[in-house]
Amino acid sequence: MSYRITLLPGDGIGPEVTEATVEVLAATGVEFDWVRHEKLGANAVDDYGTPLPEHVIDSIRGTRIALKGPVTTPVGKGFKSVNVQLRQKLDLYANVRPCKSLPGIETPFKDVDLMIFRENTEGLYSGLESYDERHDIADSVARISKAGSKRIISFCFEYARTHSLDKVTVVHKANILKLTSGMFLKLAQDAALSYPELAFNDRIIDNMCMQLVVRPQEYNCIVTTNLFGDILSDLAAGLVGGLGVVAGANIGDDYAVFEAVHGSAPDIAGQSKANPTALIRSAEMMLRHLGETTAADALHTALVEIYTDGSFLTGDQGGTASTDEFARKLAERVANHV
C-alpha cells in the first residue's frame, strides 16, 4: 500500500530537514507517493500573489494528510502566518505537541513526557481586531465557543484513553476570565465525568507555567485554549531540549498536517547544519496516525539509539554531523529495526 501525502518543504532550512525526513521514512519500508509543493510562504508570493496558494489547500484536501517543513512568518507586518491560515482553512482544531525527553540532551529534568493539546482555531488568535484611531485604542477579541471548546477537550480525553495515558490537566484563567475560561473549565470538568479511569485536575495558567519548571514529571496530558496552549507548548519544548527536537501536528476531523514547529533559520539554510529531529519526530506521529505502528516504533527506537550513542548528532546538540549524515545514519538504524 502506498500513501499519497502532500509534502511542503517550506523555506530556509525547510527543504533540507524535509529531504532528511523523507530519507528516514523510506527506510521504514512504508511506501509514500509524495505530492510536492515547493512554493509556500514568501517564496510563493511573487508567483501566486499569496503565501498560501489555493492549489496547496486543494492538494491537502485531496490527500488528507500533509508533512510540512518550517515557513518564515514576517514579524509585525507582511502576510498572515501560513500556519494559522492552514489551521483555519482546513479546520485543524487540535494542535498536538508531544514533549518527551531524549537521552543525551542535557536539560534540568529527566523523564519528561508531556502532551499539550491546544485549541487551534479560535481564542485570541481568531483575528477579530479593531483600531479606534480617535482614541488610539486597539482591541482584540478572544472568541471562545462552546462547540470549539468541547471538541478539543474531547480530543484530549479520547487521545489519553486510546494511548493508555493516565492524567488530564485543563489549564485556564477562570478566576479572572470568568465567561471564556470559565466555560472552558466547566466543559472540561463535565467531560472528565465520562472518563473515570483518568485522573483529572485543573491549573490556572500562571501557576501551570510555574509548575512545569518545578515538577513537570507530575503532568501528562494538558488541554487548553489557543493562546495559553501556544505559550505552554513552547515552554514544554524547552524542558526537553527546545523546538528543534519536538514534534508537532495539527489535526481536524478530515485532515491532518504534521510539521516542524521551529523556525526556518535562514542564517544556516543550505549549509547542511540543521537538525532534522523535529520533523522526523513529526513523521513518527504521522506514521502512527496512518496506523503504521511497527514503522513508527522502529523510527522511535532508532532515534533514541542515535541520541544515546551521541556519535552522529548535529552541531546544535554538540556533535559534528551534517544534516545529511545524521539522516543517513538514522535511516540505517531504522532499517535494522523494521
Image (cartoon, rainbow, N blue to C red):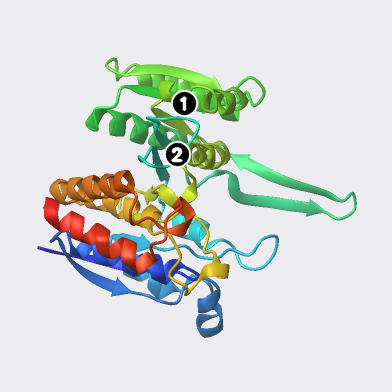
Residue 61 appearing in the image: no
Q: Nearer the viewer, residue 83 or 278?
A: 278
Q: Secondary structure at mark 2?
A: loop
Q: Badge 1: few (under 14), some or many (20 or more) residues near its Cα, within 10 Å?
A: many
Residue drawn at 55 percent across, 78 percent down: 45
Residue 15 appearing in the image: yes
- Total number of numbered labels? 2
**Which quadrant of the figure has residue 155?**
top left
Q: Which quadrant would the N terminus be assigned to in this image?
A: bottom left
Left or right for 246, reference 158: right
Percent coordinates x, y for residue 74 in the rendering: 63, 65
Percent coordinates x, y for residue 327 in the rendering: 30, 63
Left or right for 322, reference 179: left
- In the rendered image, the vertical position of residue 228 relative to residue 288, given as above or below: above
Residue drawn at 42 percent across, 20 percent down: 218
Residue sitting farthest toward the right: 134
Percent coordinates x, y for residue 292 in the rendering: 16, 50
Percent coordinates x, y for residue 124 in the rendering: 61, 43
Closer mark to the observer between disc 2 and disc 1: 2
Q: Which residue is mark 1?
A: 216
Label 2 and label 1: CA atoms lie apart by 10 Å
Which residue type does callout 1 highlight?
Answer: Pro
- In the rendered image, the vertical position of residue 42 relative to residue 195, given as above or below: below
Counting residues from the start of the chain, the first of labels 2 and 1 encountered is 1
Q: Secondary structure at mark 1?
A: helix
User: Do the residues under discs 2 and 1 have CB atoms within 8 angstroms?
Assistant: no
Q: Nearer the viewer, residue 111 or 252?
A: 111
Q: Which of the numbered marks, if any, corresponds to residue 240?
A: 2
Which residue type does callout 2 highlight?
Answer: Val
